[in-house]
């Protein structure tokens, strides 16, 4: 099967997803990417850009494909009308890493509903859809319902049924090989090490995490701290404050550029924490769990799909659950593998193959 991939935001989780897909599926892929920046421009104009490349670039002349795969940052409805005629009737599949209805906006920016509507028309124009979590699909459909309730004197009868009929849940496969090969020597008798490995942004709610750690430090509860994750020019001030207030607890504080170093640091941890207010999936936590960290995650968002109730907390229950997790400590290697193996590429390849090969 020959598959053309159109990815206007080729970076981060989108790039890692395609690397795994290309490596593990028994298909031939042609990848047409754009660098991962200027997402609003990408979502508006990637479709005509890709259509133009496919129409004029000699390397695509006369090429035919069995499927076209897009991420949800492609305006598929526009793409349908702009593709060269010999590509226009090829089954078109869209993978939703995120949706614009539930994606957090920067305060005080208002949500631009046109991006939401592009997601909706993309879903309607695609032949098949995959969402990376049930939460992603549910929040997408809830957002559609809320927005379309404001629509004046028009109707989109049956849109939800049409979308559900062609949608499936396909978790993004993960490559655990580097974590599994990590041979980090861990000190015995040291205090439990807490891991934070998320983007340094407000939607990950670092304020709850660090304020809880301040309380533990004041109570003289022993712990170490590893803070990873990508940071940006603008970041919540709590990170600067935490670096100072928790200095004596810090094992590592900052983004790990090298993948091997990242895996090594994960293998030093005992408990990995998410306090996120927003999460479409949860790759960072799953990677840390594979490394042996006991997870502590919210009982909402995508996390109920990923982890058993024993690893989840509700509302004001966070501090108590964190202390309990610290007391129990790391997972055994067998536990770490049993909780994460179903999310690995070898386990998911069959489902992706069926999705690509399905007819209609």
Image (cartoon, rainbow, N blue to C red):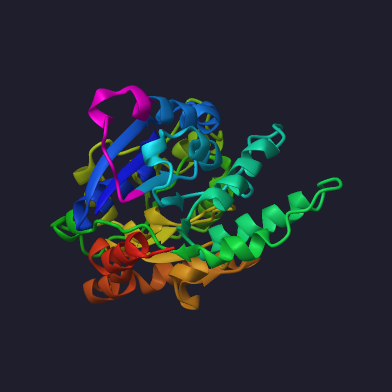
Residue 308 is left or right of residue 114, and the answer is left
Residue 60 within the magenta-colored segment of the rendering = yes
Please state which of residues 354 and 83 is positioned toward the viewer in this rendering. Answer: 83
Residue 39 locus on image (x, y percent): 50, 31
Counting from the top left corner in percent of width and height, residue 170 is at 41, 63
Please state which of residues 119 and 303 is positioned toward the viewer in this rendering.
Answer: 119
Outermost residue to the right? 153
Residue depicted at 46% across the width and 36% down the height: 244
Q: Nearer the viewer, residue 244 or 197?
A: 197
Q: Which quarter of the image is occupied by the N terminus?
A: bottom left
Expressed as whole percent of the image width and height from the top left, the position of residue 283 reads 39, 55
Residue 197 screen position, x and y as percent: 39, 48
Which of these two is toward me, 26 or 320? 26
Which image quadrant for residue 282?
Answer: bottom left
Which span of residues is magenta-colored?
53-67
Q: Is residue 88 magenta?
A: no
- Dividing the picture into quadrants, the one containing residue 193 is bottom left
Number of on-image labels = 0
Identify the residue at image location x=34%, y=22%. 56
Q: Residue at x 41, y 25 (%)?
A: 52
Task: Give the quarter of the figure containing the C terminus.
Answer: bottom left
Q: Is residue 246 left or right of residue 62?
A: right
Mark yes or no: residue 103 visible. no
Residue 113 visible in the picture: yes
* Residue drawn at (24%, 45%) of the image: 29
């Amino acid at each position: 099967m020959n598959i053309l991939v159109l990815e206007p935001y080729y970076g981060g989780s989108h790039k890692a997803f395609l690397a795994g897909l290309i490596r593990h599926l028994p298909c031939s892929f042609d990848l047409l990417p754009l660098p991962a920046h200027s997402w609003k421009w990408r979502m508006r104009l990637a479709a005509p850009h890709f259509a133009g490349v496919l129409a004029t670039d000699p390397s695509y002349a006369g090429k035919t494909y069995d499927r076209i795969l897009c991420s949800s940052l492609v305006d598929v409805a526009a793409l349908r009308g702009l593709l060269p005629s010999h590509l226009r009737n090829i089954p078109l599949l869209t993978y939703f890493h995120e949706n614009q209805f539930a994606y957090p906006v920067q305060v005080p920016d208002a949500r631009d509903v046109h991006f939401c509507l592009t997601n909706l028309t993309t879903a309607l124009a695609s032949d098949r859809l995959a969402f990376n979590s049930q939460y992603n699909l549910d929040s997408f459909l809830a957002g559609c319902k809320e927005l379309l309730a404001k629509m004046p004197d028009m109707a989109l009868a049956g849109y939800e049924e049409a979308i559900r009929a062609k949608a499936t849940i396909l978790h993004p496969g993960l490559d655990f090989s580097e974590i599994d090969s990590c041979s980090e020597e861990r000190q015995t008798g040291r205090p439990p090490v807490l891991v934070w490995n998320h983007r340094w942004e407000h939607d990950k709610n670092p304020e709850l995490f660090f304020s809880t750690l301040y309380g533990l430090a004041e109570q003289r509860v022993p712990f170490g701290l590893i803070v990873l994750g990508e940071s940006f020019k603008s970041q919540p001030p709590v990170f600067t404050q935490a670096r100072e207030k928790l200095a004596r607890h810090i094992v590592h504080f900052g983004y790990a550029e090298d993948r091997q170093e990242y895996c090594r640091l994960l293998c030093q941890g005992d408990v990995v924490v998410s306090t996120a207010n927003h999460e479409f999936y949860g790759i960072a936590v799953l990677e840390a769990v594979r490394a042996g960290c006991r997870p502590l995650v919210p009982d909402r968002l995508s996390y109920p799909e990923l982890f058993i109730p024993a690893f989840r907390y509700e509302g004001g229950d966070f501090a108590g659950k964190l202390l309990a997790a610290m007391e129990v400590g790391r997972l055994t290697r067998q536990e770490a593998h049993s909780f994460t193996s179903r999310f690995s590429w070898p386990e998911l390849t069959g489902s992706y193959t069926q999705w690509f090969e399905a007819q209609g």
